Image (spheres, rainbow, N blue to C red):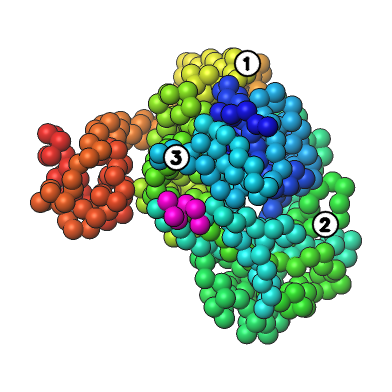
Amino acid sequence: MFDTYDVIVVGAGHAGCEAAVAAANLGSRVLLVTMNMQTIAQMSCNPAMGGVAKGQIVREIDALGGYSGIVTDRTMVQFRLLNRSKGPAMWSPRAQSDRQRFAETWRSLLEAHPRIDFWQDMVKGLLVRDGRVHGVVTGMGLEIPGRSVVLTNGTFLNGVIHIGEKQFGGGRAGEKAATGITEQLVALGFESGRMKTGTPPRLDGRTIDYSVLEVQPGDDLPGRFSYTETPLPERQLPCHIAYTSPDVHDTLREGFDRSPMFNGRIQGLGPRYCPSIEDKIDRFADRDRHQLFIEPEGWNTCEVYVNGFSSSLPEDVQYKAIRRVRGLEQVKMFRPGYAIEYDFFPPHQLELSLETRQVKSLFFAGQINGTTGYEEAACQGLMAGINAHRAVAGEEPFLLRRSDAYIGVLIDDLVNKGTNEPYRMFTSRAEFRILLRQDNADVRLTPLAAALGMQDMTSRMDRVRAKEEGAAVISRFVRDYSVEPGQVNAFLEGLDSAPLTQRVKLYSLLLRPHVGMDDLRKILPPLDEVLNPFDREITEYAEISMKYEGYIRREQEMVDKMNRLEDLGLPDQLDYHQLSGLSKEAREKLSRQRPRTIGQASRISGVSPADISVLLIHQGR
């Protein structure tokens, strides 16, 4: 019934969708297996993409040929560039999406791909022979042959949903859990664990008094995620901000004795940086209010998402408490929030390619690796899809270093440091974040995607070259053009910036804090004339490159030093227990994780600089 597929992707969430298109766009024949064709690319929690560090990841996915940015741009209802008051390394795009249109758009793109087939069924096991995967077994007993398999099971592996004292099996509200895979993988020698995440109640927007809430509009000049010519939104929906109160907190506490979090029924660790509302008021008992974001779910629905009110308390307690929030006194609830526990596999069992160490040609991506968030899942799916294709083709894996992309930071953290709680990306996790900005992801990564042979890269590379050439034209003008005091002193005085006493190059003026290209072009017609042919993306990239070039240069020097360690390989069969200079902890950690390079070894928790010196001496350095 089935031919042998190059890549079988199990699960059609954000990781699965990106894995499927990545492998297909490289030339693989792909089968996407999902338990429900109606929930492909479902936004199970918040209908939004991006945010701090996550926005950088979405732009990196797009630069590598993934579709998350394109789908988000086509379906957004609001766009905001976060952290604009900080340096450009912190600028992070975020978009609120229309939940239904997001899933519809993803499905239409997948169905339009001639190399992607679909099958609706649960995968209950893998075909494994001689330490290599050869396909999957479905719940209907069908054996589907495949040269590689990517597991992107999300929260479905033995998922259990908790609402107060009620608990029932499920991978998501209204959908059954997936069984069989965990048990088989454990029998094959894999280590598994349990994690927990949650979601807030959904409300009827017709019953909210928006007049008493703070309005949070989108940006006046909205941007986009994709580096292609996706449409910019002509109009946007506002979000709103509400606050909890001591009255809300007291009402929530009434249900603590029935909370699965506090009575021990939930064993899995939840996300530290996205706690439930009951966890927040328990951990931060001194705070008398918490911020809630009231976010629309789409253009043609009154359903509203309450960001910040994730809960697994009994539904009657949730309902009573939410109606104590100012503006929500008469609100009606569509469905309560819930917590979900699910199986994951500690990611130290993976190669940096996301291939498992125990079974060849088997790849894990997304929440199965202990991460949380659509963006973290999607980028892993992209990388797993690329490397599944390359494994089948007999090619070396495609790896991103920490200095290449936030995607490289994420995967390196997972594999080398592991995680015992849902992993979320932050800008603080990247030591080279000045290099890994959202404005330059195309310059960093699109040439790599083109070299891989990713489909439809010619026009993208033309745009990258045009961007770099445009930035060079702007840079030459700014460095050569001289400014007279009379041209700019009135402007500088308005900023409380020291006036000029003599002619200076425009470049030195641009280096001043709070002096930007958009302001200067208004008072310097020759600059405006130079900038006019170029769009905002190019002028912003040029300005950042000039304004921060000293920092960028120093960070690149650090990268070059680090890469010298990164290129020093370690033998696969090195017996660390025989190296007498290593600490006991280092021997244990290195023996378990088997790092491929000195650089990788240096980032394993418990391996000290002294241990690295021992390894360098052993390798003749």
Q: Nearer the viewer, residue 592 or 214?
A: 592
Q: Nearer the viewer, residue 417 or 354?
A: 354
- Residue 481 appears anywhere in the view: no
Q: Residue at x 25, y 50 (%)?
A: 591
Q: CA distance from mark 1 to mark 2?
A: 39 Å
Callout 2: SS: strand
Disc 3 marks a residue whose amino acid type is Arg
Indicate which disc residue 541 carries: none
Left-right relation of 487 to 356: right
Q: Nearer the viewer, mark 1 or mark 3?
A: 3
Which stretch did the figure color magenta? 183-188
- Residue 43 appears anywhere in the view: yes
Disc 2 marks a residue whose amino acid type is Glu
Residue at the left extreme, as displayed = 580
Q: Indicate whether residue 336 is drawn in magenta.
A: no
Give the crowd class for mark 1: few <14, some 14-19, many >=20 residues within 10 Å: few
The quarter of the displayed image where residue 264 is located: bottom right
Mark 1–mark 2 CB contact (< 8 Å) = no
Residue 397 % position (x, y): 42, 29
Reading the image, the residue beneath label 1 is 459
Residue 455 % position (x, y): 60, 20
Residue 520 % position (x, y): 59, 28
Reading the image, the residue beneath label 2 is 303
